[in-house]
Amino acid sequence: MSDFEIGVTGFGVLLLLLAVRIPIGVAMISVGMVGYVTIAGPVALLSYLKTETYWRFTSDILSVVPLFILMGQFAAKAGLSQALFNAANVWLGHHRGGVAMAAVGGCAGFGAITGSSLATAATMGQVALP
């Protein structure tokens, strides 16, 4: 079987598994693992799982996300995010839907300061709720 035929067969099996109400994640990982074993062999799959798991957990990109959220919480407790929200509310609050627009404006300002959309969403969600 060629790689293309294995891919088409795997897609069909995936649709079949979804039709019999297997959870999406379980269906995708099982079809992917069977396809990988079919194309590259079981030793290659085990080697891939070992190295990929290690690199995912030691990623520099994911290690800074909690620190950005912590920085956002410090800014929220210091009142910086409330001040940004109030400034945006003064500019946009008198319009219809002004609280939502003020939240977006505060998010834009806070996102420019922190550089993290995750920290911005976590912080401004606390500030904008009435």
Image (tube, rainbow, N blue to C red):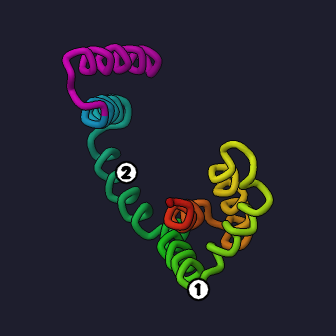
Q: Is residue 4 magenta?
A: yes
**Residue at image x 37%, y 51%?**
48
Residue 58: x, y in percent? 44, 70
Label 2 to label 1: alpha-carbon separation: 45 Å
82 left or right of 20 in image = right
Q: Is residue 106 above or below residue 64?
A: above
Q: Is residue 76 above or below residue 95?
A: below
Residue flagged by tag 2: what amino acid is it?
Tyr
**Residue at image x 33%, y 29%?**
35
| Quadrant of the rendered image containing residue 41 | top left
Residue flagged by tag 1: what amino acid is it?
Ala
**Residue at image x 50%, y 59%?**
129
Q: Tag 2, which secondary structure?
A: helix
The residue lying toward the viewer, choosing from 106 and 11, is 106
Packing grade of label 1 (10 A; few <14, some 14-19, many >=20) is: few
Residue 61: x, y in percent? 55, 66
Q: Nearer the viewer, mark 2 or mark 1?
A: 1
Question: Which residue is disc 1 drawn over?
Answer: 78
Residue 55: x, y in percent? 44, 63
Q: Tag 1, which secondary structure?
A: helix
78 left or right of 43 in image = right
Q: What is the total number of numbered labels drawn onto the structure image?
A: 2
Q: Residue furthest front?
A: 94
The residue lying toward the viewer, choosing from 109 and 88, is 88
**Residue at image x 24%, y 20%?**
17
Please report the bounds of the magenta region as a residue range: 1-24
Query: Magenta-highlighted stretch: main secondary structure?
Result: helix
Mark number for residue 5?
none
Residue 44: x, y in percent? 34, 46
Q: Residue furthest bottom?
A: 78
Question: Which residue is disc 2 drawn over?
Answer: 48
Q: Is residue 83 magenta?
A: no
